[in-house]
Image: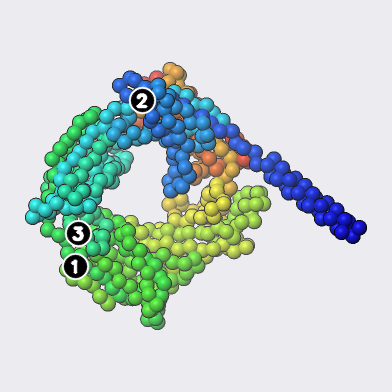
Amino acid sequence: MKSSSMARIVLVTVVLVAGVIAAQAQTQATARVAKPSATVSGRVTIKGKGAPGISVTLRKEETGPSYDVPPRATTDQDGNYKITNAAGGTFYVTPVSPAYVIANADGPGKRIVISEGEAIENIDFSLVKGGVITGKITDSEGRPVIQTQVRLYRQQTYPPGTLRPGQNYPTNFQTTDDRGVYRFFGLLSGKYTASVGRDNSGTTVSGRVAYGEVFYPDVSENAKATVIEVSEGSETTDIDIVLGAPITTFSASGRIVDADGVGQPGLRFTLQRLTDDHRSFTSALTDTNARGEFVVENLAPGRYAVYLYQEPNSELRAENPTFEVMNSDVTGITIKLIKGGAISGMVVLDTQNKNILSKLTQLQVVAYVFNLNNGGSAGGSSRSTIGPDGSFRVAGLNEGIASLQVMPSRDIKGLMISRIERDGAVTPSRGLEIKEGEQITGIKLVVAYGSATLRGVINSSTGQIPPGTRFVVSLKTPDNTPVSVRQPTVDERGHFIVESVPPGTYEVTVNVIGTRLVLKNNVTLQDGQVGDVQFTLNLQDNQ
């Protein structure tokens, strides 16, 4: 009987535990309400005929790296595709076919704004054969330069006063083979320049022979380079570049010490190369050893500044962070750490969300300092943890203009500084000016929590927005205070989304670039909800 009773007890216990687990699983499943997925569909053609077997991807527009696998689909025999598991947000739709490009396009895909559960159709692509640029890289003795990187710059025309990234940043890269030959393919139609050799960062790859940068055919500046024309299916050959004599590089060594001359171990830094018209960070990170010593190899001649990566709440900054490399190795560099300036005050979360309030101490306040006396170069950064009462103190600061930000943890999104006060007065948006060793107190960082989403549509009085029309969307509060949200993209359908907006009433303004047209509307956003706003564009009003 005892054995039988014990068996029944065990059985009942197992059943009860299983029931609790099942109930918990059911509760969790009920709590996890799946957001409706959207679909994106269209057709890919080549010379008017459906292109089968083309992969079409949907990649979220982001400023940082993403490790998510993007949704994708493959075109059928008629070139049709349908992506079925899309989330809401702003995305690039891109057909992947390396030798082909999108006809009459300036980029690899189309931007679209997707609402949850939306079915977007007719995102079509017409592909054409891309252009080719190929050539050979040799040294001054006529020998092939193997496994060296060739950079391609696309020359683009932008409205006056805007950036010209095609002039300053490479758009394509290729590496030479064992013959010194490189080959770019699948290029958009347009004008390009090409270069090879060390760029302006001042460092070279360890163990490699370094050459100065040369633009095709034999100049040192992009503005003087010969332009290479690319058209649909064209192949431009013999874009050969001869490098000059190898650059002699040098090392820099020394110590980082405190005010008493004691070496500081485990400090990490990078170098910023300073020239009259350029500021660039080297890619190499260097750490001091147990005695505070460091060695940086493969430096080209030039002036450098040490940019420290300090631990949170550090009080110290580099007193003499610059040194110069001329025509020999530099030894005996001493970087002295001294007490820097500081900014202290309180962080106030403007939200009633208890979950967010409980995570206040997971946040950090970061100050990025720009030194106006050094051509606007970076003057360092420093971080501070936040106390249970909301207090912070960012120390170890150089003089300059300090831009304050609140950095969330990975599981907290939607936080933004709505205003900064100093002794009760709102400070300028450009940042706080801090002098040498100054201790600034009485700062109040008001941080809003944005959980609402603004979804907008710009309609055209003619039924379709003219191709190439560009918009700038901004938000203001009723007291005319700008809202610091990420600038949304308006797609070719006139749709846009602004995420992580604090609840409240806003005036939404749409400026039509290149015209005098300004569209305005008001919207009230609720916590955790989606609010819609619409505009009507009439280009005749600009005449």
Secondary structure under the numbered disc 1 in the rendered image = loop
Distance of mark 1 from mark 2, alpha carbons? 58 Å
Q: Mark 1 points at which residue?
A: 326
Kindly identify the residue that appears in the image at 16 percent across and 61 percent down. Answer: 247
Q: Where is residue 15 in the image (x, y as percent from the top left)?
A: 79, 49
Left or right: residue 242 compared with residue 204: left
Check disc 2 and give the amino acid type.
Ala
Element under label 2? Answer: loop
Cα gap from disc 1 to disc 3, whole angstroms:
16 Å
Circles 1 and 2: CB distance less than 8 Å?
Answer: no
**Label 3 SS:** strand
Q: Is 292 located above or below residue 423 in the figure?
A: below
Please give the name of the residue rendered at 31% of the width and 59% of the height, measured from the top-left corner.
282
- The residue at which mark 2 appears reads as 51
Q: Which residue does the numbered mark 3 point to in the structure image?
A: 210
> In which quadrant of the rendered view does residue 324 lie?
bottom left
Q: Quadrant of the C terminus?
A: top left
- Give the mark nearest the N terminus, 1 or 3: 3
